[in-house]
Structure formats: structure tokens, C-alpha cells
């Protein structure tokens, strides 16, 4: 207490500063939480090949439908954790244990043999899977043991690939597809990825066989928090787009 009023003591002044600082932190935390809750940004994690050959040809349609949503696309070919990467939605390879995630069916894993029109014209048509033994096969060196490879595809049709027969091996599926487009050989084509290239005639299905595995693809999301409205829009759009593409291919 002073002669003409009341003032803070030194201890009171320190207490005021501490409380004010704490309240400022609370205000900032509440503001940032509100901003995060209201954000219209959504992060999608997919493989490089999926982003290149499936997502990019379609992304303009998504932006036309949802101009206010910022789509952030992360490309990865490794088995990353959703929570560690700050990812809202992810479409990984099939064959995983997705029970710990919220998950929605995306599409079957359907694999065919593809090549460029120039390569098939130059090397001759194929009549049966055994004819592949006399062609140049483009191999993918992957870190996923469950990923279908040439050995597995041929064995399904009773054909054994001789050891030491590899001529081209790549560690990125996008490069495998590019090599096929350049007429370097035949590739295994996941239909949901190379569908647009087949529709455009840039790749041709070299054999009628379509191998459908028991490892369908799913859209995953962290199970510890609800989807944001933006993530829900993206999830629904992805499912609608793949269904439309599959229906068109069947027709």
C-alpha cells in the first residue's frame, strides 16, 4: 500500500509476470489447437508410382470439387508409421495387418503383363505365360517380401523362371514402368496404377491372364483420432474415383 494508492510488491510483480506468461502460453496453445482443428489441409501418403500414374492425372478433378482443400502428397515406398509421419491417409501395399488402423477397402490387387506397342511388335505376340521365358523381363527389387514378382506370377501359371535370367532390375516401380514405356521389356502391371496407360494405348496387355491376389489395397488412417472433414472428402473421392475406373475397365 502506498500513500495515494496500491502497488505490487516485488514478489507480487514476479507473480504477475509468471501468471501472465502462463496465460499467454494457454492462449497460444488454444489458438493453435483451433487452427489445427479448422485446417483444410490433408496429407496423403502413397507410392511414387501411384502418385505419378494414378493420382496426378486425376488431381485436377479433386481440386475442382474441393478448391478450399490443400492436398499434401507424400511419396514413399517404405512401410512408414502414420503417426510418425503426420499422415492423414495412406494407401500402402496390400498384405499388411491393418486392424490397428481405421481402414477402408480401396481395390483388389490385380496384376497383368504389359509392354509397349513397339516392343510387342518387335518381339512378336505372346500366346501363353511360358512364352515370357524368351522375352526381356523388367524386374523390381523391393523391400517388401509380400510384393508380387515375376517368380510368383509365373509360378501361379505353372512356369518356373530359370535362375540367373534377369537382365534389368530396378528398385523403383516408376522406373520399371518407364522402362516398359521405352520399349526395354515387359513389366508386371498393377491395373489400378497402369490403367490410364492402357486406356491411352501407351502400354498394351501382353497376355490375357489377370492375376488377382488375396492382398487387396486399403486406405488407412490413424485410429486414435477422427478424420478431419478434409480427410473425409479425400477418402470418399479416392473410393469414388477407383470404383469409376474399375467399372470403366470392366466395360
Image (spheres, rainbow, N blue to C red):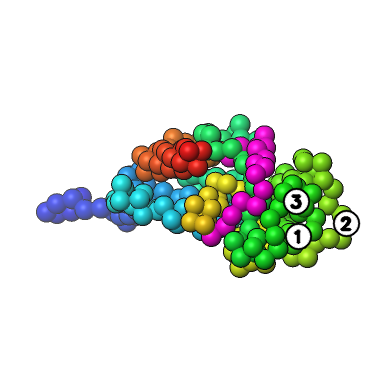
Closer to the eye: label 2 or 1: 1
Residue 122 counted in the magenta span: no
Chain-order first, disc 1 or disc 3: 1
Q: Is residue 105 visible?
A: yes
* CA gap, disc 2 and disc 3: 12 Å
* CA gap, disc 2 and disc 1: 15 Å
Chain-order first, disc 2 or disc 3: 3
Q: Residue furthest left?
A: 4
Q: Which mark is residue 135?
A: 1
Q: Nearer the viewer, residue 156 or 66?
A: 156
Q: Nearer the viewer, residue 4 or 195?
A: 195
Whether 122 is drawn above or below 205: the answer is below
Residue at point 45%, 50% (across, down): 43
Whether 186 is drawn above or below 195: the answer is below
Mark 1 secondary-structure assignment: loop
Q: Position of residue 242 (x, y in %)?
A: 47, 41
Chain-order first, disc 2 or disc 1: 1
Q: Position of residue 200 (x, y in %)?
A: 48, 56
Q: Are marks 2 and 1 in contact (CB under 8 Å)?
A: no
Mark 3 secondary-structure assignment: helix
Q: Which mark is residue 163?
A: 2
Q: Which mark is residue 151?
A: none
Q: Position of residue 103 (x, y in %)?
A: 53, 34
Residue at point 87%, 54% (across, down): 162
Residue at point 61%, 51% (across, down): 205
* CA gap, disc 1 and disc 3: 12 Å
Magenta stretch, main secondary structure class: loop
Closer to the eye: label 1 or 3: 1
* Residues shaded magenta: 202-217
Q: Is residue 29 visible?
A: no
Q: Which mark is residue 150?
A: 3
Amino acid at each position: 500500500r502506498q500513500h495515494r494508492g496500491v502497488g505490487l510488491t516485488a514478489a507480487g510483480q514476479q507473480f504477475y509476470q509468471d501468471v501472465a506468461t502462463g496465460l499467454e502460453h494457454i492462449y497460444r496453445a488454444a489458438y493453435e489447437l483451433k487452427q489445427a482443428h479448422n485446417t483444410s489441409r490433408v496429407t496423403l501418403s502413397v507410392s511414387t508410382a501411384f502418385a505419378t500414374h494414378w493420382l496426378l492425372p486425376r488431381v485436377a478433378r479433386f481440386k475442382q470439387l474441393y478448391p478450399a482443400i490443400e492436398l499434401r502428397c507424400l511419396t514413399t515406398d517404405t512401410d512408414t508409421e502414420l503417426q510418425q509421419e503426420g499422415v492423414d491417409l495412406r494407401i500402402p501395399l496390400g498384405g499388411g495387418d491393418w486392424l490397428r488402423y481405421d481402414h477402408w477397402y480401396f481395390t483388389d490387387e490385380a496384376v497383368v503383363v504389359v509392354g509397349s506397342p513397339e516392343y510387342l511388335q518387335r518381339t512378336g505376340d505372346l500366346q501363353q505365360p511360358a512364352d515370357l521365358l524368351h522375352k526381356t523381363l523388367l524386374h523390381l527389387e523391393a523391400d517388401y517380401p509380400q510384393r508380387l514378382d515375376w517368380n510368383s506370377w509365373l509360378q501361379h501359371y505353372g512356369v518356373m523362371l530359370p535362375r540367373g535370367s534377369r537382365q534389368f532390375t530396378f528398385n523403383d516401380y516408376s522406373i520399371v514402368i518407364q522402362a516398359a514405356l521405352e520399349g526395354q521389356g515387359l513389366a508386371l502391371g498393377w491395373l489400378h496404377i497402369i490403367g490410364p496407360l492402357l486406356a491411352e494405348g501407351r502400354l498394351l496387355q501382353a497376355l490375357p491372364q489377370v492375376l488377382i491376389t488375396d492382398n487387396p489395397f486399403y486406405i488407412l488412417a490413424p485410429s486414435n483420432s477422427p478424420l478431419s472433414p478434409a480427410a473425409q472428402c479425400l477418402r470418399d473421392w479416392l473410393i469414388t474415383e477407383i470404383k469409376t475406373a474399375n467399372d470403366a475397365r470392366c466395360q
